Amino acid sequence: MADPALSHAPQPDGATGVLVLADGSVAWGRGFGAAGAAVGEVCFNTAMTGYQEVMTDPSYAAQIVTFTFPHIGNVGTNPEDMESHDTPGAVGCVVREDVTAPANFRAAGTFQQWMEKQGKIGIAGLDTRALTRRIRMSGAPNAVIAHDPKGEFDIPALIERAKTWPGLEGMDLARVVTRDGQESWEGSVWHLGKGFGRSPHDRRPHVVAMDFGAKDNIFRNLVKAGAAVTVVPAETSLETILALQPDGVFLSNGPGDPAATGAYAVPVIQKLLEADMPIFGICLGHQMLALAAGARTTKMHQGHRGANHPVKRMADGVVEITSMNHGFAVDNAPGALGENVIETHVSLFDGSNCGIAVKGKRAFGVQYHPEASPGPQDSFYLFEKFVGMLG
């Protein structure tokens, strides 16, 4: 049954934004940011901070983010909080209240202005509780988000666009968000009053990072943990990776279906495993490491997105509070992981897989984001663990 806040109601006066779901449900609001229309999967994020980092995370490509926290915009925006400058993140966002004016000494501009400059569409005034409830009950829907300052919308055409969009399952988006060429990563983590650090040029273990839609803070944390990092595009060949003489290989986060991206990435990862290369994967990289080791992945009902997800470490029972952003997961149903995969972490929300290790190999991955940004820093030890394997 459709929620009354998400019904095909007539357009109210002053409505300049609309969210149209594939089932024909329509929610009206006040548009901000870029004008236009964009199609994607609607998800929700429960984080109380970090909206700019969320909107620039390439893992949100082809998604419309519903922020459950009602006050968005209060810290403004600034160039330092971008998780990616050159690749698309979320196509738009939905918020409850009108965007708050910035009240933060780091603000260099407003969220509305930033959204317009980034080409992203926002809608304020929607019942985000109702939308979140809808996603939790019925799964993440496909939808079109639209903004027209004149309030002129062709609703039947928008519904048709939402209906005909194929959805994220089976979609390889890593090709869309990966960088074009090889890069030697130079930055380190940010400190208040000092900005971003620089990577030292001393001799340190060399990590080749495969970019499937990486957040920049991952590379900064690898540097902080003691590595030198070279970033390569998603479809880099095994021969090119080995020619860089890595001490270890990192598999990044990213958007889309891991099985689709895995069509070209998994054979490379399997060859790296055969060579006993140390490997660390995060999110999409974690999922593709699992595929390479014989496990399988599955589309989740609603996904996990937020900065407060409790994860249990199986080895000692320690609970980490983590940042998450994923709509697919490694299938941990009985027998699904296969003989070569050890489950190392599980979600305390729903028992889904949050970490693996590969038997007999120096390879592990986690579903969550130990680099935070936004989110807690409970899991930085994983970067130190990986770099410690490279000596």
Image (spheres, rainbow, N blue to C red):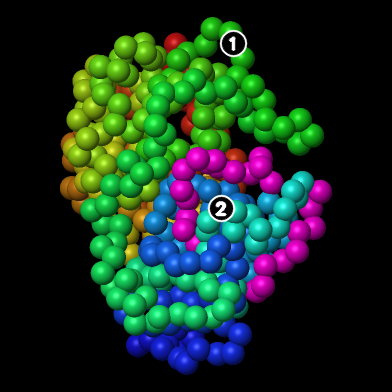
- In x, y percent, where is residue 98? 67, 72
Image quarter where the C terminus lies is top left
Residue 194 highlighted magenta (yes or no): no
Q: Residue at x 68, y 51 (%)?
A: 77
Residue 126 or residue 147, whichever sits in front? 147
- In x, y percent, where is residue 147? 52, 71
Position of 78 with respect to 132 (left or right) is: right
Based on the displayed image, in which of its 4 quarters is residue 240 positioned?
A: top left
Residue 23 or residue 274, whichever sits in front? 23
Q: In the image, what residue type sits under mark 2?
A: Gln
In the image, which residues are magenta?
Answer: 78-105
Residue 239 or residue 2, whichever sits in front? 239
The secondary structure that dominates the magenta segment is: loop
- In x, y percent, where is residue 65? 49, 62
Q: Are marks 1 and 2 in contact (CB under 8 Å)?
A: no
Residue hosting label 2? 118
